[in-house]
Image (cartoon, coloured by chain):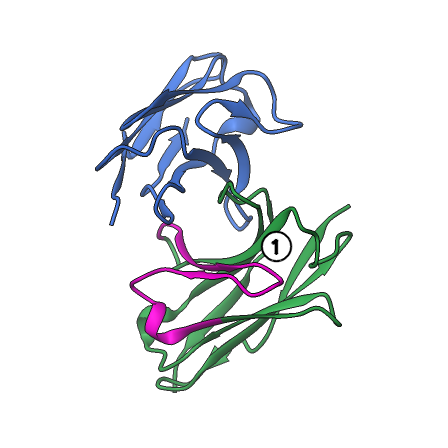
Amino acid sequence: QLQLQESGPGLVTPSETLSLTCTVSGDSIRNDNYYWGWIRQPPGKGLEWIGSGYYSGSRYYNPSLKSRVTISVDMSKNQFSLKLTSVTATDAAVYYCARLPRGDFYFDSWGQGALVTVSS
Amino acid sequence: DIQMTQSPSTLSASVGDRVTITCRASQSISNWLAWYQQKPGKAPKLLIYEASSLESGVPSRFSGSGSGTEFTLTISSLQPDDFATYYCQQYHSPSTFGQGTQVDI
C-alpha cells in the first residue's frame, strides 16, 4: 500500500530556505507510470500546486513560484524533496507531497501534510 | 494562467439531498479536471479524474460531468460522511485549483 510521508523543519526564518522531504513507501519512485509533486495550503485557505517531477529529470513548476522552487529526487532513498528559497510569511502553509499518474497530472495519493510556520 | 471558479462557496444541505457543485474554467481545459474531498485536518482525497472517471473505491453516489469550461460534481444522496470541502483542479496547463466549496449541514 502506497504511503507518502513529509518531513522537515516546522519553523523557518524569513528570507531563509524551506526544505521538505517526502519518503515514499509501497512503490518505487522510479515507477515509470508516475510523477511526484508538492502542493501547499495556507491555514484556512485553498490549495496551490507548487511543482511536479519525474525520477529521470523532467520538472514542472508553478510559474508564480518557479524562481524560488527546486524539486529533486533521491532514488537511493526513495525520496523526493522540495526547496523554496527566500521565504516570507505568505509561504506559511501545510505542505503536501503527492503522486501523479504520468500524463494525467492529478494527484491520486497524498501524504498527511507538514505544517511550516515562517517566523523569526 | 487558467483560473478556476467554483460555486457556490458554501452549501447547506441535509442527509439524502442531491448536491451539485459547479466549477468553471477561464478557458477550455477539455476534460482535464479532477475533484477532491477534504475534511478538516486531513489531506485531500481524489474523487473524480478526467472530469467523469470515478476513482477506485469512491462511492458511486459521486459523479462528475462536463467538458470545455463548465463542470459539475454531483452527490446523488448526501451521506453524513460527505460533509466536507470540495475542490476542483484543472491539469490542462499546468495545474490550478478552485477556491473550494464547503458542504455543511
Residue B39 in picture, x, y percent from top left: 51, 41
Q: For residue A54: magenta?
A: yes
The N terminus of chain A is located in which quarter?
Answer: top right
Point 53% across, 51% down: residue = B41
Instruction: Describe residue B28's horizontal placement relative to residue A71 as left or right.
Output: left
- Relative height, residue A15 to residue B9 (above, below): below
Q: Nearer the viewer, residue A13 or B72?
A: B72
Colour given to chain B in the rendered image: blue
Three-letter amino acid code at the position of disc 1: Gly
Instruction: Describe residue B55's horizontal placement relative to residue A38 as left or right.
Output: right
> Could you say which chain is coloured green in the image?
A
Residue B71 in picture, x, y percent from top left: 34, 24
Residue B89's image quarter? top left
Point 40% across, 42% down: residue = B91
Q: Nearer the viewer, residue A117 or A32?
A: A32
Q: Which residues are magenta?
A: A45-70
Residue A91 in picture, x, y percent from top left: 37, 70
Q: Which residue is mark 1?
A: A111
